Amino acid sequence: MREVIVPKNYQHILALVFAVKEINENPKILPNITLGFHIYDSYFDERMTYWAALNLPSTLVPNYKCNNQKHLAAVIGGLDLDISVYLANILGIYKIPQLTYGSFSPEDAGQSQSTSFYKMVPNEAHQYTGIVELLLHFGWTWVGLLARESEGGERFIQALKPLLSQKGICLAFSETTLNMAYLAEYYDMFPHWIQIYQAIMESKAKVVVVYGGTKSILALQTMIVLGEMENVTKTSDGKVWILTAQLDFTAPPLRMSLDMQTSQGSLSFSVHSNVVQGFKAFLQAQNPFEANGNGFVKQFWAEVFLCLFPNSNTEEQASGTCTGEEKLENLPSSGFEMTMSGHSYSLYNAVFATAHALHAMFLPGAKYRRTVEGEMQEFQPWQLHPFLRSVSFNNSAGETVTFSENREVEAGFDITNLVTFPNNSFTKVKVGRIGVEATPDQPFTVDDNRMVWHRSFHQVPPLSVCNPSCPPGSRKEKKEGEPFCCYGCAPCPQGKISSEKDMVDCVACPKDHYPHRNQSQCVSKTTSFLSVKEPLGMSLALFALSLSLLTVVVLAIFIKHQDTPIVRANNRDLTYTLLTFLLLCFLCPLIFLSPPERVSCLLRQMAFGLVFTVTVSCVLAKTITVVLAFVATKPGSQMRKWVGKRLASAIVISCSLIQVGICTVWLGTCPPFPDSDMHSVMREIILGCNEGSVALFYCVLGYMGFLAIISFVVAFLARKLPESFNEAKFITFSMFLFCSVWISFVPVYLSTKGKYMVAVEIFSILASSAGILGSIFAPKCYIIVLRPDLNSKERLLKRK
């Protein structure tokens, strides 16, 4: 069967020729020594590789040499890993240095050392890291994997899968393509490729990672063309193909017309390359009629330009006669590139690394240098190893080439973006970098602004996820039987938020924040307290001021009519005291409506407790005075000496001093203090006063209640005393109202939260105070103002 030429690989040969030419023209490298080369074709075949290895100088007849004028220094190759391993099986026996320029050595470092590998490509681990970082950079968590069925492909899958899983990336599918040992098997693969293409196109994954050898890209392109020709069911969108460094867009001449548009926007990890001065001009100078010993150029020229040379014996059809005027730059990029590829750059560096090692070896004083009559004698290839390991030089591109301890070139990978054109040409745009030459704190870099995507993506990076992201305000919910990349979304529970997409769990807001309506963020709570600026506080303040004004009016009436019988008969001084403290009771709520600060918190409960105690004490004193006054009027009664102002004052002072003692203990042990309630109202922080000691607070209330109950009981017993104006029944009613209000206060107070607790206490203060004012003083004011005829001593002493 006729050989099939892969034109793009011809650039590798030209890179070798160009490097040798530069070295031989440089008097500073290997002076007086001419560097030569032999080129052998592996034909992608194991047997041919072994045959070529045995035909190398020094290995044709094992352990025997006779008049051999060709001194083998090193072997550069092969392009694929399998070919490199086949070569190593032979070269390892003789310890001949092998510099691989397009393949990775086996992962076993010990095996790499024993087989004399020198890798002109970086460590493959950088490529694994780069693939994962690239997927994470664009948020692609649902991807496909397509690998060649080989030892290298299996190793790639086994190494990449755990890395993807650790970073939260899942495989939508993992397909392997059969390995082609011969290009003749190409057509037998069509049914298998169509099956794979269908699986790829039916998947929701928009990104496919492809691993393979130099022949795999042709299989991938053919698979896409076949799938489209067979009308395989597919999505309307394209795919982003992520290609590993082993792959390159190569094609035989008859396949250079394959449509490249489906590969638009592909991303490749390629071996790092740079612009080598003079190489493009060297390519442009190629002419089949000036071969200068290049035996490949005519066959290459005829294949790619579909022309025939004069006196050609071939019977194949051609478009015309080869003139030598054809231009390499006019060829499609899939056939031949004018810029040095990563593989060619590695091969170029491999030639220079060998030359510099030889130069170091032949320097005066070198260990293995021997001369006879000024000429270099034959040396053994294994003697070159120590010089290769330590070689370090700057190439013509201005980059330093050196080997690491593992015999790997210390370089990284370029991330290139494929931009296609209608004439089936393309260009590779470098958009990123991965590897040791990137900055230590940022080993992976990519420039989104330089990216070109497949036309179906409208120049926007595609989404490649199993399902849409869970929006803020929700959390991920695992689906049974599905990979972890496939999940549902559940809203955050009440009181929790998720501020980012795809959060595993929702988090609670800080105490001084509350969840926004959509539960996507925390909003600061506003501070609030019961003040006169809000409707409830304003209403209570107006009510308190109205009652205060009414109390002042009553007090003014009593003062104006202080000499009338009804005022004098009810202990005028005690009445004034009661009205004064009732006025203070009505003004107490204004302290409760002020901002809760340390002073106001101390004042509000203490003032309330003391003022109310004096008020109730005054009522109690009036009640006892009424009873004693009736008893003292009886003949022979000994109670006359107790009736008077001194008794009333003693009752008020003694009862008040007990409450002062309780308040003093309260202030000394656990006084009230400013506090904030962050839980009662979701969107507000209620500022208030903490009672400090709840027990002492209820002691204050309890003591007032005790005085009120005594007053009620005494007044109740004296309600039917035979007097014309019996004040006891009004006191009884006022104490009944007072006790009812404060008994109701306790459960209502305990069941409310925040500022409504303050409102309940204010209302209880006003209601109980108003009950005393209305019950005791309303009848008297009625007589004084509206019925002055009843305000006389005769009517007051009249019996029923």
Image (cartoon, rainbow, N blue to C red):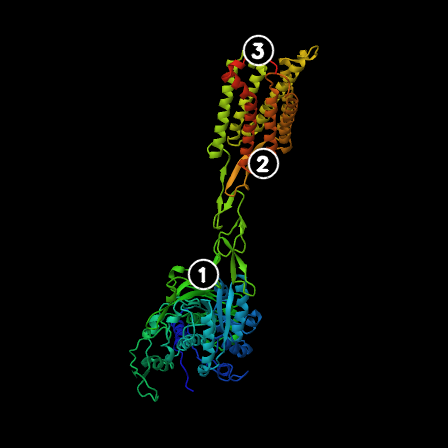
Number of other residues with Cα within 10 Å of mark 3, as a class: few under 14, some 14 to 19, many 20 or more: few
Q: Which residue shows up at 43% across the image and 65% down it? A: 414
Judged by depth in the image, the label closer to the viewer, 3 or 2, is 3
Question: Which amino acid, mark 3?
Answer: Glu
The residue closer to the viewer here, 405 or 224, is 224
Q: Earlier in the sequence, mark 3 or mark 2?
A: 2
Question: Which amino acid, mark 2?
Answer: Val
Taking the image as shown, residue 522 lies to the left or right of residue 455, namely right
**Mark 3 — residue?**
794
The residue closer to the viewer here, 364 or 432, is 432
Please say whether residue 313 is visible from this viewpoint.
yes
Taking the image as shown, residue 64 lies to the left or right of residue 716, namely left
Disc 1 vs disc 3: Cβ atoms closer than 8 Å?
Answer: no
Q: Earlier in the sequence, mark 1 or mark 2?
A: 1
Disc 1 vs disc 2: Cβ atoms closer than 8 Å?
Answer: no
**Mark 1 — residue?**
138
Quadrant of the rendering where the C terminus is positioned = top right
**Mark 2 — residue?**
748
Q: Position of residue 779 (x, y in %)?
A: 54, 20
Against 510, is 590 above or below? above
